[in-house]
Image (cartoon, helix red, strand yellow):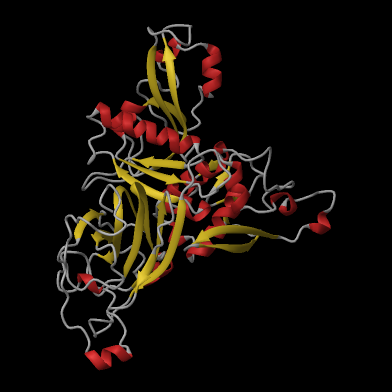
Amino acid sequence: DLCEDPHLFVNGISSHDLHQGTLGNCWFVAACSCLALRKSLWQQVIPDFEEQEWDPKNPEKYAGIFRFRFWCFGEWTEVVVDDQLPTMNGELIYCRSNVKNEFWSALLEKAYAKLAGSYEALDRGSAADAIVDFTGAVAESIDLVQGKYGETISEQMKLFEDLLKVHKRGGLISCYVAASSGSANEVETEMGLVVGHAYSVTAIRKLRLGERLVFSFKAEKLFMIRLRNPWGKREWNGAWSDNSEEWKKVSNSERKSLGLTLENDGEFWMTFEDWCKNFTDVDICRIVNTSYFSIHKTWEKKMMRGAWAKNSEPLLNRSGGCFDNRETFLQNPQYIFDVKKTEDKVLVSLQQEDRRKYKKEGKGDSIPIGFEIFKVEDNRSYRLHKLTVQERVATSLYINTRTVFLRRILKQGRYILIPTTYLPGITTRFILRLFTDVPSKLRELEADKPKMTCWSLLCGYPRRVTQIKIHSAEGLRKQDRSGG
């Protein structure tokens, strides 16, 4: 026994509860820190937590097992583990709590390792992937360097407002400093940040300084972000770090409302501008609202399951590679959907099968994937075999991550979305999620051409397609003022 009075939780759950162990899974600990911020979310992952808790008054009720739930490839999956945890010299080897007799984080990690196949499979990973597995959220990754967010104030402000909205609406955010080519991970920068290390975003705020009156126009406005290092130590040492001079501008009550602590606990504030300049990547996990009983925007969701599968027959092959492979590109799965409004913001999430279970075979890395969107004829109902008048309106990044995400505003009309692997001939499963303002009628196109009918036998089957684009018309029966 590790202690005499073990508990699942001690005084609730907090992002300060966790510390990384010997495993290189700071990304998992960062995801857990994010999860701990949202009670409604962690209660999905740890169901009936009060019933699973150790009760010293009724020890006979303790079963020695714990239940956890994960959103696994589009479905909620229950994982059961016992209370045996890996130790060395009487100490937990992996994730552990600040409080010696609290074990929710260690047991959650064990359940997640079971889902992935082993603890070893958790060595290196993505905080965004773990958050999606905890919540079913939609993950978006942004390269802060490529987007030049550290250089352009206008882009910084757009991103700040976006992250603030995500955070207010229950989304979870993590970030990291990527190692440059040839550089080592886990190295501390001059500013106290750890390279290759995932940090959880625990707060985003706007502050006014310089005047006591809230509505004073002379007040200096600051855009701030609070982060947490899963190690529970090593903090940012630049402007607005725990002991910096800048905090003297802030009243004690404001410091208290911000939750400022002057301890080396791994949590710290920094300006959003400094954050954009010092971090390289951010993972945004949106909890997309699909409830009709909400004051916030409600999205229409459609999810499809599919697979890239090889076949020597071109009409049956479904692994044609990206758009660069012109001869085989249209042999991929094709999905059709409609935009009913004049314009509609569309969110697309393409997620491939989790490959961590293949890690022992040396095939645990994600495959580079992406997708293309084409605007097609309004009456199209069969697969594309040749691109003629169809307009290529959107292309995602092609990257070897589990999930690829795209946001676009599309005009009214019919569209075909083609998910692909980067190279042809690659096989794996995927799920496609589409979020729109009004129902999109997303469905897979399976038929290549119209079916043969009795009429086809009499008159022959069509062998040529003629496309006619009508620019205007006059004198039509029931024509309205707009010509419709």
Residue name at image x 47 percent, y 40 percent: 231
In the rendered image, which quarter contains the C terminus? Answer: bottom left
Residue name at image x 43 percent, y 51 percent: 438
The answer, for residue 282, to whether it is visible in the render is: yes
Q: Quadrant of residue 458?
A: bottom left
Q: Position of residue 155 (x, y in %)?
A: 27, 32
Furthest residue toward bottom: 457
Q: Position of residue 413 (x, y in %)?
A: 30, 56
Task: Tell me: 166 left or right of 178.
Answer: right
User: In the figure, 37 relative to 64: above or below?
Assistant: above
Depth check: 63 or 231 in front?
63
User: In the figure, 420 relative to 43: above or below?
Assistant: below
Q: Position of residue 9 (x, y in %)?
A: 67, 44
Depth check: 457 or 410 in front?
457
Depth check: 459 or 274 in front?
459
Task: Tell me: 162 left or right of 253.
Answer: left
